[in-house]
Image (cartoon, rainbow, N blue to C red):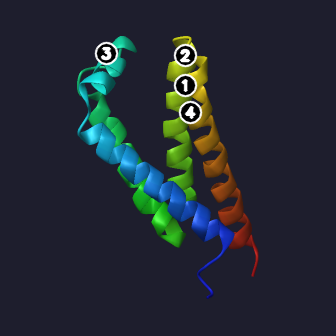
Amino acid sequence: MPGFNRGNVVAWLLAAFFLVGAYGNTFVSVEIAADYARWGYPENFHYLTAICEFMAAAMLIFQPLRLYGSLLGSAVMLVATGTVMFHGEYAHAIPPLMVLGLCGLVARLTARRRRSP
């Protein structure tokens, strides 16, 4: 199957992750809303996060936009990591750092694929 390679699989898994995140940030629980407030973000900031996550997911699915999706996803994960680290929640930085690493892997594989004939 020509479209089935590790780069595509990782990109699709990341897209699924960001879709779930977009849903969770669109329909935030009371606990998540309290986290955003504790971190000092405006009341509706979670909608901006949801939009960015949805856009990253959509771009990760389509090969021509995949590099941009991985970069947008990286930006979202950098902000998430920075937020929890700034507030001393170091253990909470591990998941976004792992996703950031996967975004970097997808970006590298995508860039390499674009260079090869």
| Residue in the foreground of this view, choosing between 109 and 19 | 19
Q: Which amino acid, by three-letter code, is at mark 1? A: His
User: Which of marks 3 and 1 precedes in the sequence?
Assistant: 3
Q: CA distance from mark 3 to mark 2?
A: 15 Å
**Foreground tag (4 vs 3):** 3
Which quadrant: the C terminus? bottom right
Secondary element type, mark 3: helix
The answer to whether marks 2 and 1 mark residues whose Cβ atoms lie closer than 8 Å is yes
- As displayed, is residue 41 above or below residue 10? above
| Residue in the foreground of this view, choosing between 9 and 58 | 9
Q: Which residue is mark 4?
A: 78
Snapshot quadrant of residue 26: top left
Going by the image, does 37 lie left or right of 60? left
Which quadrant: the N terminus? bottom right
Snapshot quadrant of residue 99: top right
Q: Which amino acid, by three-letter code, is at mark 4? A: Leu
Secondary element type, mark 1: helix
**Foreground tag (4 vs 2):** 2
Q: Which residue is mark 3?
A: 37
Q: Which residue is mark 2?
A: 89
User: Which of marks 2 and 4 precedes in the sequence?
Assistant: 4
Q: Give how far across and how far down residue 36 sits, in percent.
A: 34, 21
